[in-house]
Amino acid sequence: MFKIALHMTYQRLKLSLSLVFVVVLQTYAQQHSDHTMATQQRYINEFKTKAPLVLVDIGDTKLATRHYQGTGTPLLMIHGTLEDHHSLIALAALLAKQIPNPIILFDLRGHSASVLSNHKNGSIVQDANDAAKLIKKLGYTSAHVLGHSYGANITIKLTNTHPNLVDNLFLYEPPAFGLLMGNPKYRAGVKKAGQIIAQTKTAFEQGAVEQGVKLFTEHIAFGMGSWNKILDKRARSIMTLNYPTFLDQLQDQQRFHINVAKLNQHQGKVVLVYGNQSLPLFKASIQEVAQILNSEKHFLIKGAGHEGIFTQPSQLATKVAESLR
């Protein structure tokens, strides 16, 4: 009996110590996370101070731009659909601590603080031309370019149409969905996506703006629950505000049909970035793009999905900085 009691006491002690260990680890992890977030926010505040938002006149419109001064070839960063430059600002702020290069953030035409002056439908051709004009207007002959989502498609279009303006390019999950259309193994996914896009468009046209944006973000972009779990109040507000331009872009048939193969003629690095938790349609797009590109540069953001560029910016900042050195 004594041995049994002793064994039971030992087991209870072992369990208690295990629980204490778990609590200590959780406390440490939380403190570490809080410290990391505080540091990141400090970097963002410093970045904003050194690169205040200004309107840059590129001829037929004005683009809200943050121009962080530095030396060498600049890094131009292009945000995705419905978003604005804030989705990339944490990444930019972290990069500013690791590379000497100038960094340029801006809101695409018709997004947030930028001006949609011609009252015409948005298009990927127009967006690529705007990026080219901005590079020149700021006094540069070329730039490294990083694009997220639709911004990655713009980056590809910019490289194909203005190859001399682009040095190295970083593509975070370009939605090259044109590569999936007509392929039997993607038929069900493409059909479902088309239905969601149609429902999103209908919601916008009926004035149900938030419903439409939420539908798109949860079923096409970031996954179920992302509206509240991943996107903060600022992001939700901005994406809702930018819906008219997105509605225009839905009429642009070129936005998903981009010439990925032409990138193999480009002289600079072509770096493909992706998360391992992205939705099936983006995984399929990445797979098809990777098969076309000759580039062996692939960056995986572990534990991330399509939103990894702003939820896990430190991983990407380190990889981009290393690639640019």
Image (spheres, rainbow, N blue to C red):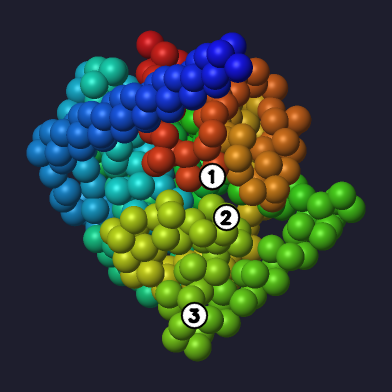
User: What residue is shown at x 55% (from left), y 69% (from top)?
Assistant: 215
Q: In this view, does 245 lie to the left or right of 259?
A: left
- Residue 149's tag is none
> Are circles 2 and 3 on residues that touch, CB within 8 Å?
no
Residue annotated with mark 3: 204
Q: Is mark 1 on a helix, strand or loop?
A: loop
Look at the picture and state if 136 lies above or below 220: above
Disc 3 from disc 1: Cα separation: 23 Å
Q: Mark 2 points at which residue?
A: 223
Residue hosting label 1: 306
State which quarter of the image contains the C terminus: top left
Give x and y (percent) for residue 88.
Answer: 35, 42
Residue 143 appears left or right of 194: left
Residue at (10%, 39%) from the top-left corner?
49
Q: What residue type is labelled 1?
A: His
- Which secondary structure lies at badge 3? helix
From the viewer's perspective, is residue 200 above or below residue 229? below
* Residue farthest along the right direction in this orientation: 184
Dot 3 amino acid type: Phe
Q: Which residue is at the far left?
A: 49
